[in-house]
Image (cartoon, grey):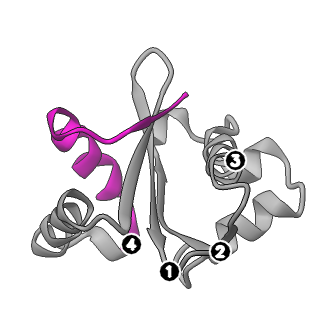
Amino acid sequence: MLIRFKKSFEKIAMGLLSFMPTEKDLKQLQQTMKQYETDDDWQLFLWKEEDIIGAIGVVFKDDDIVEIGHISVNPSHRHQGIGKQMVTAITDLYKNKTVISTDHTVAFIDKCNRGGNQEDCE
């Protein structure tokens, strides 16, 4: 289930985002988290089953475009289709908008959109 980020989830969200290649540096990760917390055009969502096991972040580029800038799944829950479920949930949430990817998320999202196996889309 997709839930909106709250400050009380900050440590787990930072842990999940730290798996992204662009967020390995602590200062960069802290800047990204601050952006999600303070910029209305940046929205971070968490994927919760029994525990929070994934994160997906979007940026509103304009009135019609939502860009998936971050997507990460806890390594112990990968290859179970969680990433694909998160992408689908975002697409459903913003069904009146075009959902696009960044250079860092394009390969993953393309695999999911091509109907890849659940294993391909974490």
Identity of the amino acid at label 4? Pro
According to the picture, the residue beneath numbered tag 2 turns out to be 100
According to the picture, the residue beneath numbered tag 1 turns out to be 61
* Of pointers 1 and 3, the one earlier in the residue sequence: 1
Asked if residue 114 is among those painted magenta in the image, a careful observer would answer no
Foreground label between 4 and 2: 2
Identity of the amino acid at label 1? Lys
Q: Secondary structure at mark 2?
A: strand
Q: Nearer the viewer, residue 29 or 91?
A: 91
In percent of width and height, residue 86 lies at 60, 45
Q: Secondary structure at mark 1?
A: loop
CB atoms at circles 1 and 2 under 8 Å apart?
yes
| Real-space CA distance between mark 3 and mark 2, rounded to the nearest whole angstrom | 14 Å
Asked if residue 17 is among those painted magenta in the image, a careful observer would answer yes
| Real-space CA distance between mark 3 and mark 4, rounded to the nearest whole angstrom | 19 Å
Identity of the amino acid at label 2? Ile
Give the quadrant of the N terminus. top right
Foreground label between 1 and 3: 1
First to last magenta residue range: 1-21
| Real-space CA distance between mark 1 and mark 3, rounded to the nearest whole angstrom | 22 Å
In percent of width and height, residue 31 lies at 15, 72
Q: Is residue 89 above or below residue 66?
A: above
The residue at the point 42 percent across, 45 percent down is: 45
Q: Secondary structure at mark 4?
A: helix
Please give the label number shown on residue 21: 4
* Of pointers 1 and 2, the one earlier in the residue sequence: 1
The residue at the point 78 percent across, 64 percent down is: 111
Q: Residues within 10 Å of mark 3 (few under 14, many from 20)?
A: many
Foreground label between 1 and 2: 1
According to the picture, the residue beneath numbered tag 3 turns out to be 84
* Of pointers 3 and 2, the one earlier in the residue sequence: 3
Q: Nearer the viewer, residue 110 or 96?
A: 96
